[in-house]
Each structure stands twice: as C-alpha cells, then as structure tokens.
Amino acid sequence: MSLDQSGCYVAIDCGCGAGADTEYLSQAGYAVHAFDIHPDTFSMCTERFHSHPNVYISHEAFETFSYPRAGIIIAHASLYFAEPKLFSATWEKLERSIQPGGIFSGDFMGIRDSWAHRTSGPTNPLTHAEVAALLTGFDVVTFDEHDKAGITSFGKPKHWHIYSVMAKKRPTTAS
C-alpha cells in the first residue's frame, strides 16, 4: 500500500540533483516536476530525461518555482539551501501544493550543522521545534534527527545535524 493517498499522480522533486528520485517517481507512474538551481544538474537532467514525456525539468530555485498540485513532494538534501528570508513564504507554497493525503519527504538542516552559519551561500538552519511547527498540518510518519561528525562526499570533515522527515498531509477542515 502506498503512503500517498492523495489520488494526485503528480510529484515534485525539489533540488533534483542528478535525478535519482525523479527517475524513481517517474517509474512509479507519477508526472514529475523536477527543479534545481544549479546549471550543471539542470543540463544533466534535461539530457537524462529528454525522452521521458512525464518528466518536466526546470532551472529554478525554491523561491521562484511554480508548485503544481502534487501528491508527493521530495526535498532531500536541498531544502536547507532555500533563502532564509523567504523560507516562510516558500514553505507555505510548498505546503499548499501538497494535496490532502499526499506526502512530504525531505530534510531540514539543524542549528548544530557545521554549514549552518557558512558565508559562501544561504543556509536555513532550524531547531527541532521550528521543524515540528512546519508540520502542524501533517501526520508525521518519520522524524529522525542526525547529529554526528562525518565526512562530506569530497572527503572533508563535517558535523551533520539534519532532520529527515516523512509526513502525510491531513485533510483540511471546513470552518
């Protein structure tokens, strides 16, 4: 049984990178809207998915993407690079896009992450309570906190503080 109970066979892959999640969702029968702000990944995915009629690749940022109605939104290892000053509005658009019964699966950067206060680009570190507050309209399926020393894919030491979340959007109640 699928976790997505929305009946909406549209998925969004936010910060799609090389497109692994895009591929999986496409093979599962979803029309996939995938975006990434990096020109190299956009080009790579445009080439990779050029013959997939149900995959739409955009060179966009979280803040400018036009979120369609979706049954699944994935934001793995990407949402914590959304512009902090615009994060509230960005999350609101993302949350509105997910249909009742739909799934959000993504990661949020914690405040103890060694990239939380870097100066080379925006990061959006959040506390446990701030992440939990974002999920008030959802039933949380998993909420895992990773807070440990590790190594980046480039072999550099790094402290990881990440919240990995999967949550199902509750039906809205009429007032």
Image (cartoon, helix red, strand yellow):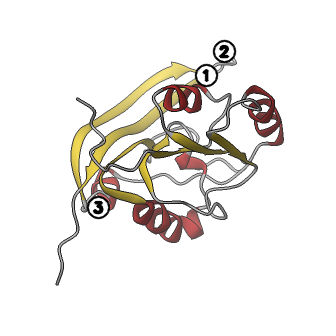
- Circle 1 or circle 3, nearest the eye: 3
Which residue is located at x 58 percent, y 41 percent? Answer: 115
**Alpha carbon of mark 2 to alpha carbon of mark 1: how far?**
5 Å
Residue 24 in picture, x, y percent from top left? 51, 26
Residue marked by disc 3: 133
Q: Amino acid at mark 1?
A: Thr
In the picture as drawn, the residue positioned furthest to the front comes out as 53
Residue 68 in picture, x, y percent from top left? 53, 60
Q: Nearer the viewer, residue 98 or 149?
A: 98
In the picture, residue 137 is in which quadrant?
bottom left
In the picture, residue 129 is in which quadrant?
bottom left
**Alpha carbon of mark 1 to alpha carbon of mark 3: how far?**
29 Å
Q: Provide the secondary structure element on which disc 3 rests.
A: helix
Q: Nearer the viewer, residue 117 or 99?
A: 99
- Label disc, if present, on residue 155 of the rendered structure: 2
Vertical relation: 153 (above or below) 40: above
Which residue is located at x 45 percent, y 61 percent? Answer: 97
Q: Provide the secondary structure element on which disc 2 rests.
A: loop
Which residue is located at x 24 percent, y 61 percent? Answer: 136
Q: Nearer the viewer, residue 1 or 12?
A: 1
In the rendered structure, are the residues bearing label 2 and label 1 in contact, judged by CB atoms less than 8 Å apart?
A: yes
Q: Quadrant of the N terminus?
A: top left
Which residue is located at x 22 percent, y 46 percent? Answer: 140
